[in-house]
Image (cartoon, helix red, strand yellow):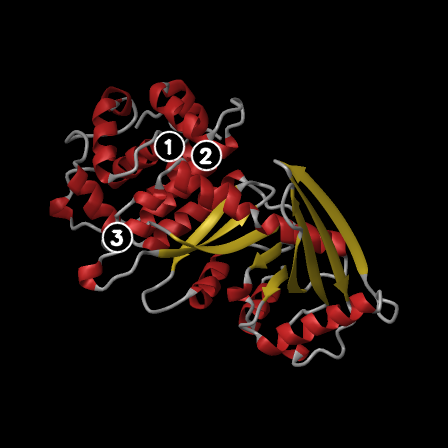
């Protein structure tokens, strides 16, 4: 097969097992996958869009794909992605990610859940909207993978499955309060990574201990304890936000601390927000960490965690219209989410144009040369 598409991309997905029986195969699986990947990059958001895009670019696809029976129909895309093994597809995705990026030491890996596809609910069948847990590498600006939260379950069961897939040695994993669990902390340490975990009242003793400790320490001006402090100030759009980060390794007194493998420090963020014409508000948030009590480094990890909201979840909703998708049959929703992650990674890695993701998708659809440039990143 003569191809203009970079071979590493094809190689990573060429080994995915075709879920169809032989007599029903009118199209090669790799052809279906390549068209779907290219279509997703270029603005397609549904099985119907995939078929329309394929037919519009049929001459171009004919230059490097077999396409013995033309472009697959929307039903073909729907059936294949609904039946495609999500774990195998995820493995191929991770293989590709590993081929294009090397996670740096102390890179922040943010793990967070998102209620995908709010229109994917099926009330008559009693099915709620699909929920996914994703991992985001802040410095590399890459989606590393995602796992669907099973019905009648929650993120606590999905996070370990996602962590098991990832190569995170030397990184700092950040998770919100849902992931503040002793088993999850242990799994992160076993994978030779550090953690910064948010603490809320779902861990009542831990929350109470840390809250009372920092309340006492602030009143005492930290005279009787060891600590580090770091401060940042943000000014924009008529508001000023001062964030003060405190970290301490004074944890010998902490109840049940032996259950938290790798625990070295506790931390607090004090956010003071002033909006012109309104009262100043103060909020305190608490964390446990496997890092040393370095307030600047822990603060970097805490701030880095929110990049998953701004750089992944928000972009998927705005540029990929993920929130409007109603796909949910079989593995379709999870595999489609994987296609969006792949497309987003490719688009973010292409840096020659200083335009938004949505505009890059449009240009890729109009300009095959630019599409190939994206695929080669």
Residue occupying the far front of the picture: 277
Whichever of labels 1 and 2 marks the residue nearer the N terminus, that label is 1
Whichever of labels 3 and 1 marks the residue nearer the N terminus, that label is 1
Eyeballing the image, is 200 above or below 173?
below
Residue occupying the far right of the picture: 223
The secondary element bearing badge 1 is classed as: helix
Looking at the picture, how far across and down is residue 185, in whole percent?
A: 59, 68
Disc 3 versus disc 2: nearer the observer: 3
Give the position of the N terminus as an image quadrant.
Answer: top left
Can residue 46 be seen in the rendering of this structure?
A: yes
Mark 1, other Cα within 10 Å: few <14 / some 14–19 / many ≥20: many
Looking at the picture, how far across and down is residue 29, in whole percent?
A: 25, 41
Image point (30%, 39%), residue name: 33
Image point (74%, 68%), residue name: 214
Looking at the picture, how far across and down is residue 65, in whole percent?
A: 27, 29
Disc sitting over residue 346 in the figure: 2
Q: Are marks 3 and 2 in contact (CB under 8 Å)?
A: no
Quarter-of-image position of residue 30: top left
Eyeballing the image, is 191 above or below 304?
below
Mark 3, other Cα within 10 Å: few <14 / some 14–19 / many ≥20: some
In front: 57, or 319?
Answer: 319
Where does label 1 land, which residue?
41
Disc sitting over residue 328 in the figure: 3
């Amino acid at each position: 097969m003569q191809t203009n598409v970079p071979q590493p991309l094809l190689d990573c997905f060429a080994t995915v097992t075709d879920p169809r029986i032989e007599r029903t195969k009118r199209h090669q699986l790799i052809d279906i996958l390549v068209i779907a990947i290219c279509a997703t990059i270029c603005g397609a958001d549904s099985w119907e869009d995939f078929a329309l895009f394929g037919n519009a670019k049929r001459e171009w696809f004919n230059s490097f794909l077999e396409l013995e029976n033309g472009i697959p129909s929307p039903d073909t895309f729907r059936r294949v992605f609904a039946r495609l093994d999500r774990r195998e597809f995820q493995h191929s995705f991770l293989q590709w990610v590993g081929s294009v990026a090397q996670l740096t030491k102390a890179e922040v890996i943010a793990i967070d859940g998102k209620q995908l596809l709010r229109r994917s609910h099926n009330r008559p069948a009693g099915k709620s909207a699909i929920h996914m847990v994703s991992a985001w590498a802040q410095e590399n600006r890459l989606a590393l993978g995602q796992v669907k939260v099973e019905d009648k379950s929650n993120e606590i069961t999905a996070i370990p499955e996602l962590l098991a897939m990832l190569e995170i040695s030397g990184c700092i994993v950040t998770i919100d309060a849902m992931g503040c669990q002793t088993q999850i902390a242990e799994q992160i340490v076993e994978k030779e990574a550090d953690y910064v975990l948010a603490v809320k009242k779902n861990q009542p003793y831990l929350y109470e201990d840390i809250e009372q400790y920092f309340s006492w320490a602030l009143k005492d001006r930290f005279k009787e304890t060891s600590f580090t402090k770091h401060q940042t100030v943000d000014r924009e759009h008529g508001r000023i936000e001062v964030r003060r980060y405190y970290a301490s390794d004074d944890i010998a007194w902490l109840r049940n601390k032996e259950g938290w493998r790798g625990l070295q420090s506790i931390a607090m963020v004090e956010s003071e927000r002033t909006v012109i014409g309104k009262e100043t508000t103060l909020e305190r948030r608490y964390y446990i960490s496997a890092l040393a009590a370095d307030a600047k480094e822990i603060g970097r990890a805490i701030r880095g965690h929110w990049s998953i909201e701004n750089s992944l979840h928000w972009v998927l909703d705005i540029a990929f219209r993920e929130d409007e998708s109603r796909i949910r049959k079989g593995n379709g929703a999870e595999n489609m989410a994987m296609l969006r992650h792949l497309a987003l990674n490719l688009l973010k890695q292409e840096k020659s144009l200083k335009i938004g993701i949505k505009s890059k998708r449009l240009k890729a659809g109009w300009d095959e040369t630019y599409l190939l440039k994206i695929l080669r990143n």
